Amino acid sequence: MNLQERLDLSYEKNCKKVESFIGSDRKMKLGIMGGTFNPIHNAHLATAEFIKDKYNLDKVVFIPTGDPPHKKIILDKFHRYNMVVLSAMKNDDFFVSDFEINKKEQSYTVDTLRYIVETYPNEELYFITGSDAINQIESWKDFRENFRLAKFIGAIRPGIGILETQENVERFRNDYCADVDLVYVPSLEISSTYIRSRVMTNKSIKYLVPSRVEEYIYEHGLYKRGVSCNE
C-alpha cells in the first residue's frame, strides 16, 4: 500500500470514528488537543493517551490549527492535517477535526470551543495544552469564556519550570473560578522544532514520529528549507 492509499484509508477511518462519536446517545468525556502539529510527533500522542487514561476520557479529538494568531509562517495546514490523520488512524479513541483548517479567519481557542459545545452539546470537555501555554491564557481572545466552556489541563513537559505556572493556576482558580489542572506527563522529550532541525540536517527522525508521518515528510520533501515556528 502506497502513501496515498494509506492516507485515503486514514481519512475513511477518521470519518467513521467521527460518525460513531456523533451517533452516540450517551454523555462522554471529550479531550481536545489543539496545536500546530508541525509536525505531530510521538510525545503529542503519548500525552493524549496518558491524559485520556488519567481522566477516564472516552475520546480525544485532535484539532490542527489553521491560521494561529500567536505563531507565524508554519507549514501548509493541509500537510499538517494529513499527518495528524495518519497518526490517529490506529487508535480508535483518537479522531481528528478539520474545523480550524477550513476556517478563513484566524484560529482562536474560544471559537473552537464554542463550535465544539454547539456540535457536541452533551459532552464534558477537557482542553489539553502545554503547561507553558497556561501562562499565556490571559492574552487569548475572550479568555474568561474559555474557562467557562472547558476544563483546562496543562501537561508539564520535561525540563520546563513550573513555579510561575503553578502561581498562575492558583490565581485563575481564585479570580475566574477556572477549573485548571497541571499534570506531569512521563512522555518523551521531543519537540516539533527538534524534528524539523533533524530533517533539515538530514538526520533520522525514526521513532520520533509515527512511521506514516516519517514517510509523509520525506515523500513531500517537507522542512528541507526550514519553517520558522515556535513549537
Image (cartoon, rainbow, N blue to C red):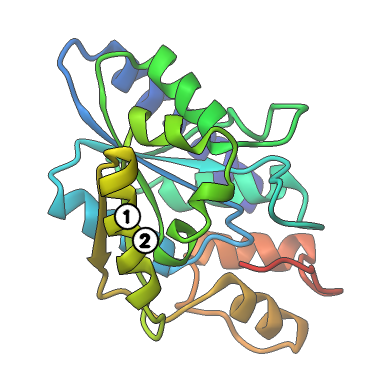
- Give neighbour class at mark 1: few <14, some 14-19, many 20+ (Cα, 10 Å): few
Residue linked to disc 1: 171
In whole angstroms, how far apart are the C-alphas of marks 2 and 1? 5 Å
Decide: is 79 above or below 163: above
SS for callout 2: helix
Name the quadrant containing residue 230: bottom right
Q: Residue at x 69, y 27 (%)?
A: 102
Marking on residue 41: none
- Give neighbour class at mark 2: few <14, some 14-19, many 20+ (Cα, 10 Å): some
Name the quadrant containing residue 65: top right
Marking on residue 168: 2
SS for callout 1: helix
Decide: is 67 above or below 209: above
Amino acid type, residue under disc 2 in the picture: Asn
Decide: is 141 above or below 20: below
Give the tally of numbered discs. 2
Q: Residue at x 59, y 68 (%)?
A: 214
Tell me if 81 is positioned left or right of 197 in this view: left
Relative image position of residue 127 (x, y in whole percent): 36, 43
- Confirm or deny contact between disc 2 and disc 1 (CB under 8 A): yes
Q: Quadrant of the C terminus?
A: bottom right
Query: For this rendering, which residue is in front, 219 or 205?
Result: 205
Task: Please indicate, yes or no, whether residue 180 appears anywhere in the rendered image.
Answer: yes
Q: Residue at x 15, y 15 (%)?
A: 26
Task: Please indicate, yes or no, whether residue 1 appears anywhere in the rendered image.
Answer: no
Amino acid type, residue under disc 1 in the picture: Arg
